[in-house]
Amino acid sequence: MGREYHFHCEHAGCSVTVGVRMGGTRELELLVDGKEVAAAHAHGHHAQTTVLTTILPTDPPRGIDVEVTLPGTLGGDPASTLLAGGERRPMPAREVPRRARPAEADWYS
């Protein structure tokens, strides 16, 4: 089972969130205002960078890229950077709530 990471920032009046699920296949998702707008899978356990691209629903529409840097086999945490208007802005990590697991006593009921 892999770990999950979330990164979030506000840009141009929109909520931009990146979800990263580490494991055998690394899964990346980009959400704008809570809706998935881009996704990718990264195979292998080597360090790599993936760019997710979308257009924000603003007036006029604005394109953004989000760069997700994944760690290699020696460990570390992923990082996410918002690329918009010629600027690079690191996206702060958000706490990911742990999913509730059944207690051993629940298995017998």
Image (cartoon, helix red, strand yellow):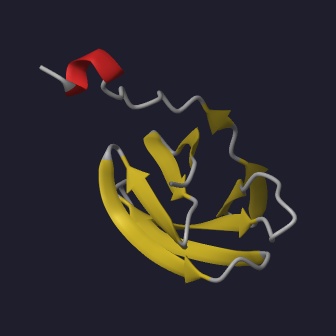
Q: Nearer the viewer, residue 29 or 83?
A: 29
Name the residue at 74% across, 66% down: 69
Q: Is residue 60 left or right of residue 3?
A: left
x and y percentages locating residue 101 in the rendered image: 35, 29
Give the total of numbered labels. Answer: 0
Residue 103 seen in render = no
* Occupied quadrant, residue 24: bottom right
Residue 100 seen in render = yes
x and y percentages locating residue 71 in the rendered image: 78, 65
Q: Nearer the viewer, residue 18 or 72?
A: 72
x and y percentages locating residue 52 in the rendered image: 53, 72
Name the residue at 30% across, 25% down: 102
Q: Is residue 89 above or below residue 107?
A: below
Name the residue at 46% across, 76% down: 40
Q: Is residue 108 left or right of residue 40?
A: left
* Occupied quadrant, residue 108: top left
Q: Is residue 7 above or below residue 30?
A: above
* Occupied quadrant, residue 49: bottom right
